Image (spheres, grey):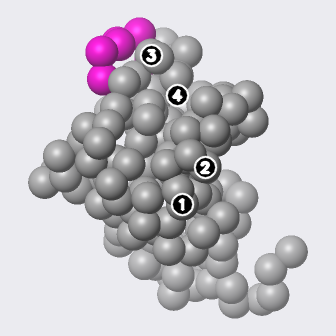
Amino acid sequence: VLPPGRMAIEQRVFPLDGSCNTAVRARGRAQVGLAAQVRVCLEEDPRALDLAGWLHTDAAPLGTESIYAVAERLASREELDACVSSAETARKIGDDVELALEAGLQGTPFLLVNGRPTPAFVPLLYALALTGGESDHPIFDGLPAPIAAQPGHEGHAH
């Protein structure tokens, strides 16, 4: 439980490659799965936020060696290899994927704000930060009503 006026943002993974995400059919981008695995392996290290930012920039040359080159600043290759191939890492990714699917999210990055799935939309995150994570704060009263999902399109992002 957070103190009043505080908010917690948790970053979760939803890799867009079928090699480590059973909800995605496309395969062939195994480096996407590796990036997610490495992020999970380093999730307890606060310095890993820099790694996550680098992995999600368009300019990043996302390949096995470039992922390890950055990650090895935080852990040895041996530690990373052991963690990446562990059942615990696969379970954590599976849990994140399941949570994302239950929430109707189908992309990455996947965020939880105070335990609730939240789009990674900077203005929304900023407003939530200003309100201490209170989604029912009066500041949100002026927003238009949400658009109802059309039949057959529930849970799909548009």
For the residues labelled 3 and 4, the Cα–Cα distance comes to 20 Å
Residue under pointer 3: 18
Look at label 3 and name its amino acid: Gly
Residue under pointer 1: 75
Look at label 2 and name its amino acid: Glu
Judged left or right of residue 91, residue 46 is: left
Q: Secondary structure at mark 4?
A: loop
Look at label 1 and name its amino acid: Ala
Q: Write down the region rendered in magenta.
A: 24-29
Q: Secondary structure at mark 1?
A: loop
Q: Find residue 79 and name its label.
A: 2
Q: Find residue 155 and name its label.
A: 4
Q: Disc 4 vs disc 1: which is toward the camera?
A: 1
Q: Disc 3 vs disc 1: which is toward the camera?
A: 1
Badges 1 and 2: C-beta atoms under 8 Å apart?
yes
For the residues labelled 4 and 1, the Cα–Cα distance comes to 37 Å
**Residue for point 23% across, 55% down:** 57
Q: Is residue 128 visible?
A: no
**Residue for point 30% across, 23% down:** 29
Q: Residue 25 in magenta?
A: yes
